[in-house]
Image: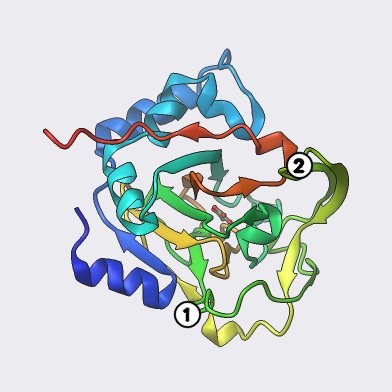
Amino acid sequence: MLSTDQVTSYRESGYLVVPDLLTPAEIETFLHHEAQPDRQRLGLRTHVVDPQWAHLAHHPKVAGCVVQLLESQPMIVQTMYLPKPPLKALEAPHPGIAIHQDSLYIRNEPETLMACWLALDDTDGQNGGLCVVPNSHQDGLLSTHPNQDTDEHVSWVQEYGMRDINGKEWSEELYSFEMDNLDQMEVRRLSVPAGGGVFFTGLTIHGSYANHSFNRFRRAFAIHYVGQESWVYRTDIQELVSTALPSSEG
Ligand SMILES: O=C(O)CCC(=O)C(=O)O
């Protein structure tokens, strides 16, 4: 259960760091599973076919926090495993994800998108941990340009199918967005110990930089949710999965 102060802090600043969501054994089991060669994958919907991904996506501690923050039945939109290995001599560092707002990638109506980002290692600014811009969720979607710093951030462009609630279909090109006029002084590089998580809204500006450490992995798992009242436009992630809510009998 989150305290009233934690919920208020999330509403005001657009994000909340919560320690001890996963146990060391849960992390170990997930990472061991990911190291196996014959896992089943279904892109951003791997939680539908893989029991370990489903375990994290429906995790009772995570789901309990999401229900409190969303104030609605959470529907899982997508899941992502985000490993960033440490530096290797003579190789470029493993890049991060340009500083962005998720709702640009996952348009939803009404806007309820939120994420839980789970640290599977001790993470911070040096090994490419999550960064957020506090209070940045209050002005809607802001203008962007394609990512330019390819040393720090991956660059990509991809065509996505869209479908509205009436069945009208079209496609849109999305790319590695980077916020216009980003003030680097406002970017907070979070320190999140393994097992902790960061909850943030679909409008909160966030992302990560490259892993510049020589011996520290940065592995994370992210789950994106909308409330059951929201429509998600992208067809590849339109089939939502209802979160198994923790039993109130505990
Ligand atoms: O883990 C990262 O590097 C960034 C994750 C992110 O952007 C997200 O979960 O939406």
Q: Position of residue 77 (x, y in %)?
A: 56, 40
Label ID, residue 135: 1
Q: Where is residue 83 in the image (x, y as percent from the top left)?
A: 55, 43
Between marks 1 and 2, how big is the CA–CA gap?
A: 34 Å
Q: Which residue is drawn at 50% across and 20% down?
A: 50
Residue at disc 1, secondary structure = loop
| Image position of 201 (left or right of 44) | left
Which of pointers 1 and 2 lies earlier in the amino acid sequence? Answer: 1
Q: Which residue lies furthest to the front in this view?
A: 166
Res. 101 image quadrant: bottom right
Going by the numbered disc 1, the residue's amino acid type is Asn
Label ID, residue 166: 2
Q: Which residue is drawn at 38% across and 72% down?
A: 11
| Residue 48 drawn above or below residue 227 | above
Res. 39 image quadrant: top right
* Of marks 1 and 2, the one in the foreground: 2
Could you classify mark 2 by the number of other residues whose Cα lies within 10 Å: few (under 14), some (14-19), or many (20 or more)? few
| Residue 179 drawn above or below residue 247 | below
Q: Position of residue 245 (x, y in %)?
A: 30, 35
Going by the numbered disc 2, the residue's amino acid type is Asn
The answer to whether mark 1 and mark 2 are in CB contact below 8 A is no
Disc 2 within 8 angstroms of ligand 1 (CB): no
Q: Residue furthest top?
A: 38
Q: Which residue is drawn at 41% across and 67% down?
A: 15
Q: Where is residue 233 in the image (x, y as percent from the top left)?
A: 71, 46
Label ID, residue 40: none
